[in-house]
Structures are given as C-alpha cells and as structure tokens.
C-alpha cells in the first residue's frame, strides 16, 4: 500500500529543510533582516483555513455546562452530535446552537437517521424524505453547516470483537468470517447493489436541491466495516468505486462524503490519494480521523491506537491542508483504557473507550495539525 512516506524521504526532507532560512541560526537571520516564522510566534493553531478538530457531544439532555467544559478544557471548540427525531424544528435547533455558542462551541455536524423505508425502497419513503427535507431546512436556518447520514442495507457489526492491545488496552477487531454466513434480518431483507443505488438516487435527487437552498452540506459515511456482503445485502459504500459514483449522482458540494481515512485503509486504498480525489473536488463534507492495522483488505483488520496503525496520519493531515479542507475533523473510536473502564461501563464498539481515550486521540490530532502547519510554513 502506497502512502507517500518513506524513512529515506523523511531524512532527505529534513536535510533539505536544514538549508532553508527557517533553520538558519538566529544571528544569521538577524543579519539578513529576516525573522524566522517560529521566533516569538509559538505553535501554529487551528484557524479559519484549517480543519476543525471536533469531539462528539451528548445533547440528549440538552446543552449542559458539563458537556461544554468537557470539550473546551481540552482545546476543542467544534462538536458534532446525533440529531433528534424527524422532523427537526428550526427553533429548537437554533436554541441548541445558541447555547453552545455562548459557551464558545460551534455545532458543525448533526447526524440524521430514521428513514428505513427510503433505504429499502418501501412504501412510506416519500413521507420520510419530506421529513428529512424539513430537517435539512431547519438545520440551515439554525446555522448547522453539515448533516451526516448513513445508507446501510445492514451494518455488519456482528464481525466486531475485542482484542487486547498494549498494556492490556481494548482494541476493536473486525473479521468477516465471524458473520459472513448470517442470514438476512426479517425487517431488512436482502438487497443487491442495483436496488440500493436506485433508492439512494431517488433520495439524493429529492434532498440535495433542498440542501443547496438551505446552505447545508450532506455527508454520507462509507460502509464500516467494508465487508462485501452483510446479512445477504450488498453495500453501495463499501468500495472506492462506490464512493466516486455517489458524488456523480447529483453533482453538487451539498452531495459529499464523510472521508474516513480508516475505512480507506481497510479497503486497501491509499488515504492520501483518496483524500486528494475528493478534497480537490470539494466533496469532503466531514472527516473521520482514525488508524486501523489491516491484515486483509475489506475483511480483516484491527483498530488500535491512532498512533500505531497503517495510515500515515501526518500525510493525510498535510493533504487536507493542500485541498483546503476547513470542515470538522473527528478523531473517533477511542481505545479502551483502564482509566475509562474503572469509571463505568463503556458503550459502543468492543474494545472501545471513553473520555480519556478520546482525549488521547484529540491530542494526537492536534499535534498532527500543528506538525502539518509547521511543514507548510517551512
């Protein structure tokens, strides 16, 4: 797998950078009249022209000081959350946005769900699509720039299991063999690619024009895990070809993807190249920043700590800057460490973690952003 990074290239780059003015002695720079970018300026920071490192926030009980402090204390000012039941109401969303803003936090992404008839092409989908359209309009009126969604025929979470990582920490393993023979569920049925592509085409042609008028971007998350079959159903977003086809159905910045560099490597693709493809077309509307180790593309991998997988996370961050990506970047899926486990049960993925694990991922992402900004200035 290509990732644009080699040890030889790293040392070559360091040697080359050592000859530039930014690395000359301060006395020599003083004689030339130049001031190094790093002198007195501190570390570069997240800003208007950079990705916005984000954390999930729990809004089920409304906005609380506890939730706001939980992100702002660790230097995060952008959040995302699951949305309420359909249809969303503009006044209620605006009240939430304003409360967060008063605490110095921006709500940049709200997840929408609750339209199964649309996914499966069943009666009642037009009513669901109308509720989704109303919700997108409400998000626009409330100033929420991105609405994220899934379009799974079935999400193959039965393939997940817990593995043990460094120091005994919990990791998330994924193996297609654990679930490949499971039958379809009665409420879902089995569906082929043509069916699901037809259903999402119907959906996108209805809602993307609404999103454009509302100044909202839609972000479809890829299939994770990207197994070839899930309880009898094929998956439209389980291949890079599928991702590319999605943005061709309706050619609009409002019809984009959640670029997940972790899923990209799970499929055996180059995250930097894929980032460039979608970022240069302005079709990355949200970003998941994580780092699995892949044993066999599509079907077997382990998601461990963000610093030890197969993705060159710095190269991905540098590419996001190159394509001028300025939306939220979410370092998701924290690992299961004792600090969190001792404080209560952990929900979510096997081997997953909580607040302290999330803090580790966010700190790592902030360091990668600062390193990428330093390299851009050098």
Image (tube, grey):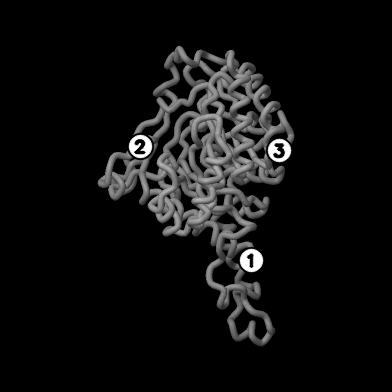
Crowd around label 2: few <14 · some 14–19 · many ≥20 (10 Å): few
Earlier-in-chain disc, 2 versus 1: 2
**Quadrant in the rendering for residue 180:** top left
Q: Identify which residue, 37 or 146, lies in the foreground.
A: 146
What residue would you read off at disc 2?
347
In this rendering, the label closer to the viewer, 3 or 2: 3
Crowd around label 1: few <14 · some 14–19 · many ≥20 (10 Å): few
As drawn, which residue projects farthest toward the left?
Answer: 342
Q: Position of residue 159 (x, y in %)?
A: 41, 27
The image's mark for residue 377 is: 1
Q: Residue at x 60, y 25 (%)?
A: 236
Element under label 3?
helix
Element under label 2?
loop
Crowd around label 3: few <14 · some 14–19 · many ≥20 (10 Å): some
> Looking at the image, how many numbered discs can be counted on the residues?
3
Q: Residue at x 69, y 44 (%)?
A: 282
Query: Where does the N terminus fall, quadrant-wise?
Result: top right
Q: Position of residue 332 (x, y in %)?
A: 46, 44
Earlier-in-chain disc, 3 versus 2: 3
In this rendering, the label closer to the viewer, 2 or 1: 2
Q: Residue at x 60, y 86 (%)?
A: 27
Earlier-in-chain disc, 3 versus 1: 3
Q: Identify which residue, 348 or 224, lies in the foreground.
A: 348
Q: Identify which residue, 179 or 359, lies in the foreground.
A: 359
Q: Position of residue 149 (x, y in %)?
A: 56, 33
In this rendering, the label closer to the viewer, 3 or 1: 3
**Alpha carbon distance from label 3 to label 2:** 36 Å
- Left or right placement of residue 247 versus residue 353 in this view: right
């Amino acid at each position: 797998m290509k990732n644009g990074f080699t040890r030889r290239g790293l040392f070559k780059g360091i040697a080359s950078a050592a000859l530039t003015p930014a690395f000359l002695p301060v006395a020599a720079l003083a004689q030339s009249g130049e001031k190094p970018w790093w002198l007195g300026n501190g570390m570069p920071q997240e800003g208007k022209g950079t990705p916005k490192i984000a954390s999930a926030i729990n809004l089920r009980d409304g906005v609380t000081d506890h939730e706001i402090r939980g992100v702002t204390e660790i230097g995060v000012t952008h959040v995302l959350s699951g949305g309420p039941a359909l249809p969303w109401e503009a006044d209620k969303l605006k009240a939430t946005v304003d409360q967060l803003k008063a605490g110095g936090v921006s709500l940049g992404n709200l997840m929408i769900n609750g339209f199964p008839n649309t996914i499966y092409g069943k009666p009642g989908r037009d009513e669901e699509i109308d509720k989704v359209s109303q919700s997108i309009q409400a998000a626009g009126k409330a100033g929420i720039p991105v609405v994220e969604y899934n379009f799974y025929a079935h999400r193959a979470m039965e393939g997940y299991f817990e593995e043990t990582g460094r120091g005994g920490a919990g990791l998330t393993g994924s193996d297609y063999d654990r679930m490949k023979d499971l039958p379809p569920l009665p409420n879902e049925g089995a569906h082929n690619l043509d069916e699901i592509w037809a259903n999402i085409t119907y959906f996108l042609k209805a809602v993307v024009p609404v999103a454009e008028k509302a100044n909202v971007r839609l972000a479809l998350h890829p299939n994770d895990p990207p197994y070839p079959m899930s309880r009898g159903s094929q998956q439209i977003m389980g291949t890079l070809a599928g991702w590319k086809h999605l943005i061709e159905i309706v050619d609009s910045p409002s019809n984009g993807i959640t670029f997940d560099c972790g899923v990209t490597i799970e499929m055996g693709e180059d995250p930097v190249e894929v980032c460039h493809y979608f970022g240069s077309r302005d079709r990355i509307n949200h970003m998941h920043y994580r780092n699995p180790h892949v044993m066999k593309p599509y079907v077997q991998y382990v998601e461990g700590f963000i610093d030890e997988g197969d993705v060159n996370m710095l190269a991905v961050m540098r590419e996001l800057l190159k394509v001028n990506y300025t939306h939220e970047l979410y370092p998701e899926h924290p690992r299961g460490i004792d600090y969190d486990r001792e404080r209560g049960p952990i929900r979510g993925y096997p081997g997953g973690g909580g607040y302290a694990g999330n803090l580790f991922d966010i700190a790592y992402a902030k360091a990668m952003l600062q390193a990428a900004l330093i390299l851009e200035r050098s």
